[in-house]
Amino acid sequence: MDFNALVKQYQEPLYWHIRRLVVNHEDARDILQDTLLQAWRSVASLRDERALKAWLYKIATNGCYLHLNRNRERPLSTEELSEVLLGRLESASYVDYEDGAGVKFQQALLTLSEQQRTVFTLRYYDEMSYDEIAEVVGSSAASLRVSYHQACNRIRTYLETNS
Amino acid sequence: MKEERDMSEQTMRWNEVGKRMPYRLPEDFFAQNEAELMRRVEQPRGGLMRLPIWLGGAVAAAVLVGVMLWLPMRETKPMATEQLYAYNETMSNEELAGWVEFYEADLFVSYE
């Protein structure tokens, strides 16, 4: 696969995955570029081409959390990260604030833990299997099912209490 | 019954959104992004571009050191006989006597 084909196939799904995690378009654009360039430079080390999709998502996901914790003395806690992301959602460009239900749903996502949010977005939006998600986040499929179930419950609770 | 109604209302709110997101994009973003990526992947990285400059600097420094070491060595060639005689003329009788005494005591020089 050449670089142009790699970009054409993966830039759009990767962009939206990254955007859901970092909220800002500009940050998502930069992380997307870094992800694809890093992947292209390291693609020779990838032994199984079937693992390409999970590998790309892994690089992208790690890039998102590195970006969010950049220039900080210690990694952000779940609550701190949620606060940062909710603040971003309130002031980000390229957000349709007239879509109240959509904004509310994304707010609910942003209150999840890092693991829950990643698992939920990969399962719900990217429709990945638990085995595929396990390759991305490095956890067991069984624990990921639990994370997804917990994420769904938290989202429902948030929608109910913030309706 | 109330719990079932609450759950169905939550489900309805969730279903209302589905996979829709409020996030938007600049026009032609993906086409521009693709072009930017192709440009970046064809350009050598900053570190590699600096390599020839670094290498050239190292070579220049090595040449300079070599010249500085070679020049003094080039100038210290053996003096010609006429120059030696001329140098001897500058020495005093005492200095000359000292050199004669030195060589007379030299174990490795034989005088017949």
Image (cartoon, helix red, strand yellow):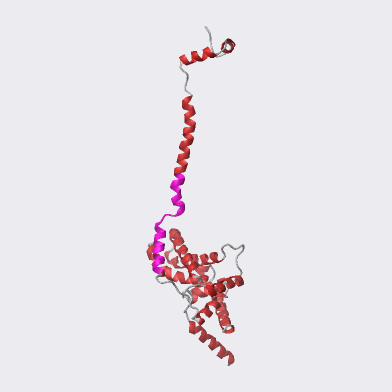
The part of the image, by quadrant, that contains residue A37 is bottom left
Q: Provide residue A25's location: percent of width, then percent of height.
A: 48, 70
Q: Provide residue B83's location: percent of width, then percent of height.
A: 47, 16
Q: Is residue B50 visible?
A: yes
Q: Is residue A46 visible?
A: no
In this picture, residue B44 sits left or right of residue A63: left
Q: Which residue is nearer to you in this view: A116 or A8?
A: A8
Q: Which residue is located at x 53 percent, y 14 percent?
A: B90
In the depicted structure, whether residue B72 falls above or below residue A149: above
In the depicted structure, whether residue A96 falls above or below residue B89: below
Q: Which residues are magenta?
A: B30-55
Q: Provide residue B12's location: percent of width, then percent of height.
A: 51, 86
Q: Which residue is located at x 41 percent, y 56 percent?
A: B43
The part of the image, by quadrant, that contains residue B28 is bottom left
- Main SS class of the magenta portion in the image: helix
Instruction: Work out which residue is located at the far bottom of the displayed protein and give it.
Output: B1
Q: Is residue B112 rendered magenta in the image?
A: no
Q: Which residue is nearer to you in this view: A34 or B112?
A: A34
Q: Provide residue B69's location: percent of width, then percent of height.
A: 49, 31
Q: Quadrant of the N terminus of chain B?
A: bottom right
Give the total of numbered labels. Answer: 0
Q: Which residue is located at x 58 percent, y 81 percent?
A: A158
Q: Is residue B33 rendered magenta in the image?
A: yes
Q: Which residue is nearer to you in this view: A97 or A59?
A: A97
In the depicted structure, whether residue B68 falls above or below residue A57: above
